Amino acid sequence: MKTKLLVVELWGVGDLAIATPFLQAASEQYEVTLLAKPYALDMQRRFWPAVRVVPCVVPWTAFQRKYRLLTWPWGNIFRLWRALRRERFDVALSARWDPRDHLLLRLVGARERIGFARMGSAVFLSRALARPEPAAHRCEHWRALAGALRLPVPPRAEIPVPAPRGGPILVHTGAGQAVRVWPLERYRDLVRRLRARHWPVEVACDPDQRDWWLRAGEGVVATPRTVGELLALVDRAGAFLGNDSGPGHLAAFCGVPTLTIFGPQLAEWFMPLHPQAQAIEGKPCPYKPCSDYCRFKEPYCLTRLTVEEVAARAEVFVAGLAGVRGAAPPADPP
């Protein structure tokens, strides 16, 4: 009988994508249960079919008003806690240096609890690991956990991804938070420039951006509402271009080379895990990295990136790929 392992990753699609090499390796040796948001069910079917997903949305992952305790669904929280305690996990872990995760591991009652301590949270852990160096990619936290469990997770540069199938450039303009979104009018101009060079482009966006694109004259706009719908778009793409958000991470794991426009966060931490992944860094800011809470009226790190700057990088990126197909070879615009 395999050892029972609980993995806690309560945040975004991109975070789950970065955890994928660990989850794949762990499911070979452990009976793995993943506590994650409901979209993990779509990812499970594609990336880690041997992992059991327990869908859960915890209140402290909300963007605003997360600590209004009287509004928390305490009944649901209590039922989830009881169900997890009944599982009697041998090992539980989190890759985040988050005391809330560590308290959760303790409350679940796992015999061994592994994580990266912060603000005294070592009292909830049975084994507190040293955090990777500050400049390390987030995947290194999962590799450190893998090392603690003696799991074979390769370095970032050696993570295997599928061969690209080929197809158009998928430009996705959405993101989990507005401060990560490069302005839509600049995406519109970028799409026009790429098409003027005879590259095929498919536009996808978040639901709240759809009307803007239709008013801007984009006749066909994909608006995936689930991870499954997003994966269907990615599967027919030859390249991906978009913001620092979950769709880019999914594209990378499906074998699609990515070009990511970074703003408040650092590419060295959150570059999608693909050997041909590239990044456009946002403009300097004294508060960077600042996650999703900008101190200014707009995220200047993004809004000061011009169409010319991004288009120049995008054209070089796409020209270097063999998998973009569906139109005549690139040519200089008239």
Image (cartoon, grey):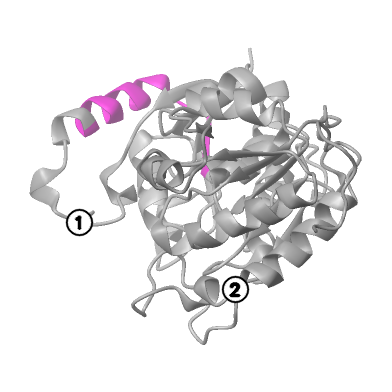
Disc on the earlier residue, 2 or 1: 1
Decide if residue 289 is in sight here.
Answer: no
Please give the label number shown on residue 65: 1
Which circle, 2 or 1, is nearer the viewer?
2
- The range drawn in magenta is 77-93
Residue 162, image x and y in percent? 82, 29
Tell me if residue 79 is in the magenta stretch: yes
Q: Residue furthest front?
A: 334
Quarter of the rendering containing residue 169: top right
Q: Secondary structure at mark 1?
A: loop
**Where the C terminus falls, by quadrant?**
bottom right
Residue drawn at (64%, 57%), measured in percent from left and top? 190
- Disc 2 designates what residue? 305
Decide if residue 232 is in sight here.
Answer: yes
Residue 245, image x and y in percent? 54, 50
Q: CA distance from mark 2 to mark 1?
A: 31 Å
The residue type indicated by label 2 comes to: Leu
The residue type indicated by label 1 comes to: Arg
